[in-house]
Amino acid sequence: MVVNKENKYLSNEFKRIIFYQDRSNKNKMKTRISLIAVMVLGTIFSEAQQKTSRTGGTTFGLRAGVNFQNINGKDENDDKLKNDMLTGFNVGINAEIPVGVDFYFQPGLLYSIKGAKSEDVIPGQSFNTTIKISYLELPLNFLYKPMLGKGHLILGFGPYVAFGIGGKATYDGGGSSLTEKIKFQKTVKSSDPDDVVYIRPMDAGANMLAGYEFGNRVSFQLNTQLGLTKINPEYEGASNDKTSAKNTGFGFSLGYRF
C-alpha cells in the first residue's frame, strides 16, 4: 500500500491536533478546577475569619459590686418572714466563651456576702439582728452581647451554686451585744451546740442581668438573684417546722475584660 506523503502529513497533523488538544483541554480543565478550589477555600477561610472576628475568642474579666440582700420565705408557723435588706458585696473573676455570633457562656467564681437584718420589739426594748453569710459562688450565665454604639449591650441569665464558707450573727439590744458564729450543717441534732447559727452549706438559684460594655472593655451591670433552695437546716424532732428561708437580692457591679 502506497502512502501518500501529503495524506501522511495530514494524518500526523490530525493526530497532533487531537492529542495535544486533548491534553490542552485537560490542562485547562485542571486549571479551572484549581481556580474553583482556590475560590471555594478562599470563601470558606473568609467566612471563618469573619465569624471569628464577630464572635472573638475566650476572654477573662474581673468584677466587683454591691449586693442588697435579704432572706425571704416563711417561719416555723408558716408566717411570712419580715426581714430588712443587708448591704453586702461581691468580687471575683469570670470567663466569656463564645458559642455563636454575639452569644457567650460565662462561668465565674465570686466571693459574695449575703444575709439580712431584722428588728424585734420586746415590751419596752428594741432588738436588732444582723446575719452575714460568706459564700463562694459559681454563676453559670448565658449572655447575649450585640453591638450597640461603640460597645456591647449585655443581657444574660443562668443558674448559680454557692457554698458557705463563713459568717456571723450579731444581736444588739437591751444595752448589750452578742455575736454568734455561723455553722454550716444540713441537719441539726438535739445534742448539737446552741450557741451558733446553723445554715445549710449550699445555696442555689437563678441570675438575671443587664448592662453595657464600653469600647474600652469597662462594663457596668445590674443583676437580680433568686434563691431556689432553702438555707435553713432541718431540726431533728421538729416535724411541724414549716420554716423555708431563701436568699434573694439585687445589686450592681463594675467589670473589666482582658
Image (cartoon, rainbow, N blue to C red):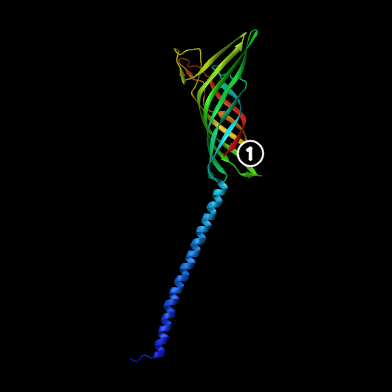
Q: Residue at x 45, y 70 (%)?
A: 27
Q: Where is residue 36 shown, x and y percent of the image?
A: 50, 63
Left or right: residue 201 compared with residue 128: left
Q: How many marks?
A: 1
**Label 1 crowd (10 A; few <14 / some 14-19 / many >=20):** many
Left or right: residue 39 compared with residue 124: left
Nearest the eye: 126 or 213 = 213
Residue that lies at the very extreme toward the left in this rendered image: 1
Q: Where is residue 213 shown, x and y percent of the image?
A: 62, 39
Residue that lies at the very extreme toward the right in this rendered image: 149
216 lies above or below 166 = below
Q: Residue at x 56, y 43 (%)?
A: 103
Q: Quadrant of residue 84?
A: top right
Q: Where is residue 188 shown, x and y percent of the image?
A: 46, 17
72 lies above or below 194 = below
Of the residues shown, which amino acid type is indicated by label 1?
A: Tyr
234 lies above or below 254 = above
Left or right: residue 239 compared with residue 226: left
Q: Where is residue 23 shown, x and y percent of the image?
A: 43, 74
Nearest the eye: 144 or 51 = 51
Q: Quadrant of residue 83?
A: top right
201 lies above or below 171 = below
Q: Dividing the image into 4 quarters, which one contains the C terminus?
A: top right
Q: Dividing the image into 4 quarters, which one contains the N terminus?
A: bottom left
Mark 1: which secondary structure? strand
Q: Which residue is mark 1?
A: 212
